[in-house]
């Protein structure tokens, strides 16, 4: 039986991330991955049971890193505007510092493995954010909303701008580069929409 090589396993993960972003879920294959890594397809099966196992494990690893980053220096007892700003700053930092991983996670989240990856990635994130919102509602700092409505208002503008930034363009192929002024403009509107 062949042994695992940590360096090779890291290479496989990195090339898988690049290929998933480039080829999408449907275009990704173990053969393409093996070629990109310069190894045999059989070598991939030392590390992963099959393509689905690889995609799930890569997705969970990225997701866990994202949710850890999102909670950095965050406290569910923070005042609402301060806590939401911390969430925005943490999410921006992750998206900018880990562009390829963020794009890959998006591909995987919209694949048949999306729900599994999300469930396995959360850790205590969901509970922490639930407490944060409940605290804010109790203090009269947040309008009570359904989760989907809250998320769409609280993070939709941010993720749209981060997507424009990742593509380097907005509507009509206009060049786009996300900056602090845009963040502050959008954040002010979001806070206004979410607070009583």
Image (cartoon, rainbow, N blue to C red):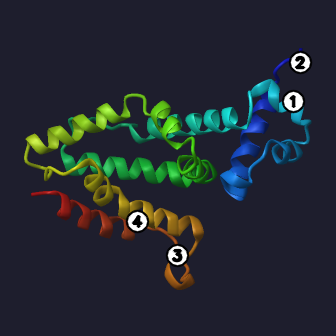
Q: Secondary structure at mark 1?
A: helix
- Cα distance between the residues tagged 3 and 2: 48 Å
User: Dot 1 surroundings within 10 Å: few (below 14), some, or many (20 or more)?
Assistant: some
- Cα distance between the residues tagged 3 and 1: 42 Å
Q: Name the residue carrying label 2.
A: 2
Name which of mark 3 and mark 1 comes first in the sequence: 1
Q: Name the residue carrying label 4.
A: 180
Name which of mark 4 and mark 1 comes first in the sequence: 1
State the residue at coordinates (28%, 60%).
153
Q: Secondary structure at mark 2?
A: loop
Name which of mark 3 and mark 2 comes first in the sequence: 2
Q: Nearer the viewer, mark 3 or mark 1?
A: 1
Q: Are marks 1 and 2 in contact (CB under 8 Å)?
A: yes
The answer to whether 102 is drawn above or below residue 127 in the figure is: below
Q: Are marks 4 and 1 in contact (CB under 8 Å)?
A: no
State the residue at coordinates (81%, 44%).
33
Q: Name the residue carrying label 1.
A: 43
In the figure, is residue 42 to the left or right of 90?
A: right
In-front residue for pair 162/117? 117
Q: Name the residue carrying label 3.
A: 176
The answer to whether 156 is drawn above or below residue 3 in the figure is: below
Q: Position of residue 127 (x, y in %)?
A: 30, 31
């Amino acid at each position: 039986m062949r042994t695992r090589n940590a360096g090779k396993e890291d290479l496989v993960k990195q090339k898988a991330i690049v290929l998933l972003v480039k080829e999408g879920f449907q275009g990704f294959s173990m053969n393409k991955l093996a070629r990109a890594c310069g190894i045999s397809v059989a070598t991939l099966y030392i590390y992963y049971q099959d393509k689905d196992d690889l995609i799930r494990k890569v997705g969970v690893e990225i997701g866990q890193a994202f949710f850890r980053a999102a909670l950095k220096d965050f406290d569910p007892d923070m005042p609402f505007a301060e806590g939401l700003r911390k969430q925005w700053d943490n999410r921006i930092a992750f998206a900018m510092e880990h562009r390829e991983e963020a794009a890959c996670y998006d591909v995987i989240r919209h694949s048949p493995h999306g729900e599994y990856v999300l469930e396995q990635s959360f850790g205590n994130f969901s509970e922490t954010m639930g407490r944060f919102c409940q605290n804010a509602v109790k203090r009269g700092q947040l309008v009570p909303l359904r989760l989907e409505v809250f998320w769409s208002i609280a993070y939709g503008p941010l993720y749209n701008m981060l997507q424009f930034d990742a593509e380097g363009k907005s509507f009509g192929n206009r060049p786009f580069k996300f900056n602090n002024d845009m963040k502050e403009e959008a954040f002010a509107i979001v806070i206004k929409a979410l607070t009583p």
